Image: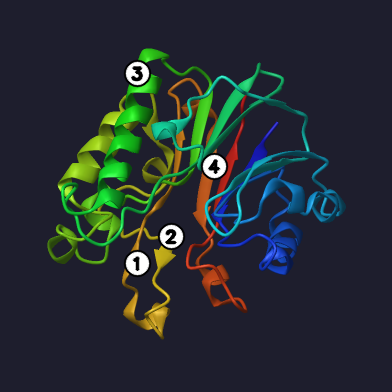
Amino acid sequence: MVMRLITWNINSLRLRLPLLKKLVEEENPDIVCLQETKVPDPLFPAEALVELGFPHQLYRGMKGYNGVAILSRLPLDSVTNTPDWCSRSDCRHIAASIQTPGGPVMLHDFYVPAGGDIPDPEENEKFAHKLAFVEEAAKWFTDSPPVRSIVVGDLNIAPLEHDVWSHRQLLKIVSHTPPETERLNTWMAAGFEDAMRRITPEPTKLYTWWSYRNKDWKKSDRGRRLDHVWLTPDLMPGLRNIRVLRDVRDWDSPSDHVPVVLDFDPA
């Protein structure tokens, strides 16, 4: 039983619902995890997503920013004993248990704070919030070691040298600074492995985000790997493939992130 999961920072679900429809038609996923849905729960387009083939939906959203959702063809059980990260209730995490022939799989969908522009927690509250969020996540998973678990989402940190277009030039740019990458690695070490880099090891360049400021994003290719797929070691033998759908960045009115596709056997 090979399952297909897509994670995507869609940057407004209602605005890009046609792109999601196209993506689903082309890739036929069993599960879709979205970030930055930017829609409050009463306005979530649940019926339209049922029509796309996802009768099982979990979502947590707010007006104008943030927001996460898990859409599934398979039954989902909501996981409600997760923290209120940094006591902000800002819709950055949702979790589900998925029943599979090999037993339940715990799925976590995260949208980590971007952190603003100044990489100094004393000068920039947004950066302080980002560091605190990642520290809190690392501690939570360390205190409750994950089993048969997946973390996906826009973690807003590119941890490795070849996760950015220029390691040297971005060391002082938010998303690739040592305080961020060290904390992200601590979180991953709480019980996960970097599944994307298992399929595409360093030193191959691997990006999932390109700024809107780059008019010709493909020519400049100044990307960063901000979107991640982590698996616990007990699920790694079932890893079949991971693909970054770069071509989606050229669709009409795209997100600045592209989808990442995971194929795995949860047995």
Q: Nearer the viewer, mark 3 or mark 1?
A: 3
Disc 3 packing (10 Å; few <14; some 14–19; many ≥20): some
Q: Which residue is mark 3?
A: 142
Q: Which mark is residue 208?
A: 2
Q: Would you say the residues marked 1 and 2 are in contact, meaning their CB atoms lie under 8 Å apart?
A: yes
Q: Which mark is residue 250?
A: none
Which image quarter holds the C terminus? Answer: top right
Q: CA distance from mark 3 to mark 1?
A: 31 Å
Question: Which is nearer the N-term, disc 3 or disc 1?
Answer: 3
Question: Which is nearer the N-term, disc 1 or disc 2?
Answer: 2
Q: Would you say the residues marked 4 and 1 are in contact, meaning their CB atoms lie under 8 Å apart?
A: no
* Image-based side of 35 in relation to 115, left or right: right
Q: CA distance from mark 4 to mark 3?
A: 22 Å
Residue lying at the far bottom of the rendered structure: 215
Q: Which residue is mark 4?
A: 91
Question: Which is nearer the N-term, disc 4 or disc 1?
Answer: 4
